[in-house]
Amino acid sequence: MRLPRRLLSASTATALAGALLAVTSTSTPVAAASFNYGEALQKSFLFYEAQESGHLPSTNRVTWRADATVNDGKPAGVDLSGGFYDAGDHVKFGFPMAAMTTTLAWGGADYRAAYERSGQLPYLLNTLRQADDYFINAHPEPNVLYVQVGDGGEDHSYWGAPETVEAKGHKRPVYKITASCPGTDVAAETAAAMAASSVVFRPTDPAYSDTLLTHAKQLFTFADTTKGTNGRDTAYVNCVGAAQGFYNSTGEGGQVEGATKMYWDELAWASVWLYRATGTTSYLDRAREFYPKMGTQEDPGGNGQQVPVFNFGFGWNDKQYAVYEQMAELTGEQKYKDDVQRYLDYWTVGYKGKKGTITPGGLAYIFYWASLRMAANTAFVALKYADFLGSGDPLYARYHDFGKRQVDYALGDNPRHSSYMIGFGTNPPRNPHHRGAHGAWTNAGPDGEPAVSRHILYGALVGGPDGADAYTDSRGDYVKNEVALDFNSGITSSLAVLYGEYGGTPLATLPTETPDGPEFSLEPAITHSSRETAAKTFVINKSAWPATVLDKAKFRYYFTLDGSTTASQVTVSTSYTQCKQPTGPHLLEGRTYYAEVDCTGTLIFPGGQSEYRREVQLRIGVADGATWDPSNDWSAKGADHMTLYGNDGRVIWGTAPGVEPSPGPSPSASPSPSPSASPSASPSASPSPSPSTSPSRSPSPSPSPSPSPSPSPSAGGACKVSYTTNDWGGGFTATVTITNIGTTVLDGWTLRFTFPGNPRITQGWSATWTQNGAAVTAANLDWNRTINPGQSIQIGFQGTYTGSNPSPAVFTVNGITCS
């Protein structure tokens, strides 16, 4: 039987200072298990492993991932290489990473038995450690916390795997908060994450738990002593402008009253977890102090009173709903129970005539952007509070069944009869908005080849359907089909609850992937004349298991000397090369020789039209009077009779004649990835033909999961503009796509249009936005100033309006009216 769990008495808590204030769950099922919760829980951890950054731990099970962005933080003298990439991009945003960590640790602290019984406790601990080790490094001094790695605009302009980001030349700036430029919200949330993690690690690694607790205390003091007065004045985005278009803690949630956009909830949340980690009642007192400041809205009962907010949901920027639940458990006081019940009633049976939007299929539609994220987080609060009440309480079934219903919806109990967790259940998504999972090589954005993502991003919960339960598995849809750290943590913790109740069977063997074809190859166009063979050859790198940067590649072309021809009569040259000058002839065996091209120092990687392939126009000829018969040459038989060598000197493509020796030692190691060397022409060559590489198509990438579309760096000439909005009544975001349909490169652009209504732009991204009355101007930034023919860029903004919000009718770029 499930019994209510109450707060340890103050005297007991004090006596247990430094021990766990954790709870355990025993359950009596009230409904049948609908899905294999053990498998879903197991697979959810594969998503976090796919997001790992830096030198990957030996525990990582994702076969298509490798070390990436290992130099993060190095210019600033800190090691920020670890942690997790946020979503379908490769920025590391500290705020949502900390929120994910706290939510996962909360589930681990209170449902440890479920993790142990399912065999998933080691993976929970691995995931928490990956985050917490990063936070330790990001907190080198008591009043310094690094809160972001990477620039969202630059990052979103590139559609490639994380293993290629440094080769692309991205600078990966780091951003921090300090005593003179603080960030109360992110410091407090990171304190909560580390305190909650310390509870989870206490039984198995008390020394590490102590380390986490030390950082948590310091970070809480940092947040507390630098806080302002109105809940927003010391928000981190005031100091870290790079986060404003992505995780803006003062702007998330639109105009919904329940999205309070203040830092008091993070301070209360940190206080709760420090109390649970230490048993020190002064932290509980601080939670009480911050609690009434977390935000209120008018009671719909018509009495004019203000009550704590209730009409939004638990998320990366809204901890008040979780604070209600934990304060109800930790104190047993009715006022806290009233607050969490008001919130949960709003999403179940309604509160005083007001009820949250539920889709026809049963999803709590809390927010349009990543609808399943908020539903899964609220599900965990509901399941947690139901557990606290116990199965004998009349409210138990209301909250428990609601929580289970939301999880089951995500796993396939919905009008589409389809799972929204990738790699689980029936008809799951296959093409999430995720660069690494796509496995692309041309940097052509989410709509570029291949059409179907090469990897299955197991365990990732996609954003989810719209308010009518409609959904399309479109990689370009970052609202409904992106994935993110904070999308997953709520459903992972909810699955732990449901596994504890209903069981399930984790898979004995996880699915494995194999490459979908050659990852590296040579593509030659071979022609012959009476005295020469020409092999216009592309070195191709479409690697994705994992994506690999070749910087020491070599290839060989094999041929046979005919008649009395000697090696001294053979010349090896090039009319154009993006690698080094070819050498040879080199003797292989008998009369068989080869020409070798060394590409050491030239980066060849799946990161763009010019980056994924390099061209060498190889020529092998003989002097007058010598015999040249290509018909018996080994490599004249085709591409697979040439050999390509990888960074370690081993053959990665093709077959050599007979026994093939390893290539000679490479020149000294090439520098760490940097933009590739320029092509070099042979000094003795006749006028060089132009290279065959086509211009790189730029991506039309995506933002992270806050209302902020992402840029893509291209467009030009005559123009076409599309204007789309996501509108929530009184507020909206707009995405503007500019396409160059002309024939010349557009180098620098200014977009102009006029609102037919009364919108006011509150923030914009990927352009310099100005508004004068109804007239709006957007000018390029440095990184997206060039738009090639046939290419597009996306820019956007967030705004407010009253009345109606019709779209602008006419757009001009550099004074030209666009179609």
Image (tube, grey):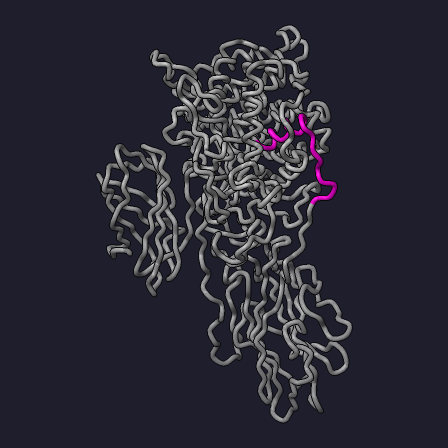
Q: Is residue 447 visible?
A: yes
Which is nearer the eye, 545 or 349? 349
From the viewer's perspective, tell me whether residue 285 is left or right of residue 1.
left
Give me the residue at 68% from left, 81% from top. Answer: 633
What stretch of residues is rendered in magenta? 491-510
Quadrant location of the C terminus? bottom left
**Picture coordinates of residue 174, whole percent (x, y):** 50, 39
Image height of 570 relative to 649, above or below:
below
Q: Is residue 706 visible?
A: no
Most prominent secondary structure in the magenta stretch? Answer: helix
Give me the residue at 58% from left, 77% from top. Answer: 535
**Picture coordinates of residue 177, whole percent (x, y):** 48, 31
Q: Quadrant of residue 580?
A: bottom right
Q: Is residue 603 magenta?
A: no
Which is nearer the eye, 216 or 130? 130
Which is nearer the eye, 139 or 364? 364
Image height of 47 relative to 575, above or below:
above
- Seen from this angle, which residue lies furthest top? 11
**Picture coordinates of residue 584, whole percent (x, y):** 65, 77
Give me the residue at 41% from left, 21% from top. Answer: 228
Quadrant location of the N terminus? top right
